[in-house]
Image (spheres, coloured by chain):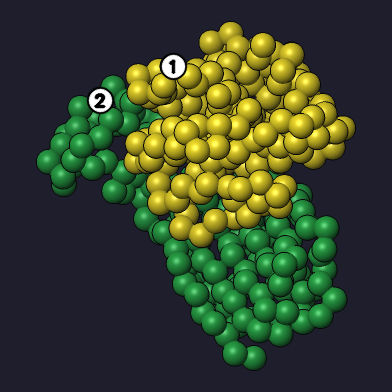
Amino acid sequence: MEHEYHHEHHHEHHHEHEHGHDHDCGHDHDHGCACGHHHGHSEAERLVEDTLVLSKSWSGEDGQPEQLAQKLQSGLEALGELLGEDGIILGHLKGLLRCGSACLACSITRTDHTDLTASPDWPPAEPCHWTLTVTVLSLCHQDRVTEETLDKLFGGI
Amino acid sequence: MEVLLFGGFLGSGKTTVINRLLHDLTDQGKSAAIVENEIGTVGIDDVLVAQTGLKVTPLFGGCVCCQLTADLLTAVHTIEDQVNPDVLVVEMTGLAMMDGIRDTFARYGRDTLRLHTIAVVDMARWPKLIRAMEPVVRRQLAGADLVLVNKTDVVPADPEALEQMSQLAGGAPCRTLSAQSMEPGAVLTLIREVLR
């Protein structure tokens, strides 16, 4: 199986690059940052600034839809165990599996429940060109998941 | 052009509510367009919404409450000029602050826009979210014209929680729903009843 490894992710503070030289974000604060402005952030903004944001895709040919779906679900559930706080995800774990024209979405906000939403034509009958996309958003336990974690859970498909 | 701006914490069910709403609108012969703002460089929500058959304008690379404010307004004005749908739905990211966006529209939006702000709240996680993320939740509810309390099939909404949400939303009405299992037409009816 030949893998087309498409790697795109945004893993940094949510607030990075948020302010340019000329902007009006609607917040009432002073500005201060590398761009020459001085920032005074609200408590809400400080909480949001440390959001873990990871987004990555993998793709390949001749994928088996049901196996890929299982990989997606089990991987997200493993992430849920790492990031959950008393069973609650203070964020959102989501994944999308596309096989040909069909797609399956997986969403986790609580460790005791996984939401699966399938397109009407899921599952496709034949092996297919597939793309798996995972997005991890968490305001808690941010140090427990890295890009390497995603590679271990979803790589090698 | 009517603009329905959806906000609410990550995973609250905004996309699910919007998908139901879009189905309801098209079933009633209304034209609709949607702008999707999503955190992360690879889209998932826009794909899910595109399953409805509608054209989706995605906004990546930041949050419209701050980094992409100008992009959002440009997109809204462009859609009004080029498409002029009956309803434009804007889905904000789960970290966006409703109050900032509302101020931006008031300051820079055209007079031809009729803006309504809707905050979606996840009842199943509410106790934990309000304890751990109160400043964020507060900013997300402030400026909402309507609060949709979602996932009440998982955890029923208690009067105390509803009162708390309404207070944080400046007295906005709160309506409960379970977006995943709503009957056709129900979401649109619920929103219309409140936002006349």
Q: From the rendered image, report the letter of the chain displayed in yellow.
A: B
Q: Choose between A109 and A59: the one closer to the eye.
A: A59
Determine which residue is flagged by label 2. Answer: A29
Residues at discs 2 and 1 both on one chain: no
Looking at the picture, how far across and down is residue B107, in whole percent?
35, 19
On-image quarter of the N terminus of chain A: bottom right
Q: Is residue A124 above or below residue A25?
A: below
- Residue A101 is left or right of residue B167, and the answer is right
**Which residue appears at 39% of the width and 37% of the height?**
B74
SS state under label 2? loop
Tell me which amino acid carries mark 2.
His
Instruction: Report the residue marked by disc 1.
Output: B111
Q: The disc labelled 1 sits on which kind of residue? A: Asp
Chain letter of the green region: A
Chain assignment, label 1: B
Q: Residue at x 15, y 37 (%)?
A: A37
Q: Is residue B19 left or right of residue A18?
A: right
Label 1 packing within 10 angstroms: few (<14), some (14-19), many (20+): few
Res A19 → quadrant: top left
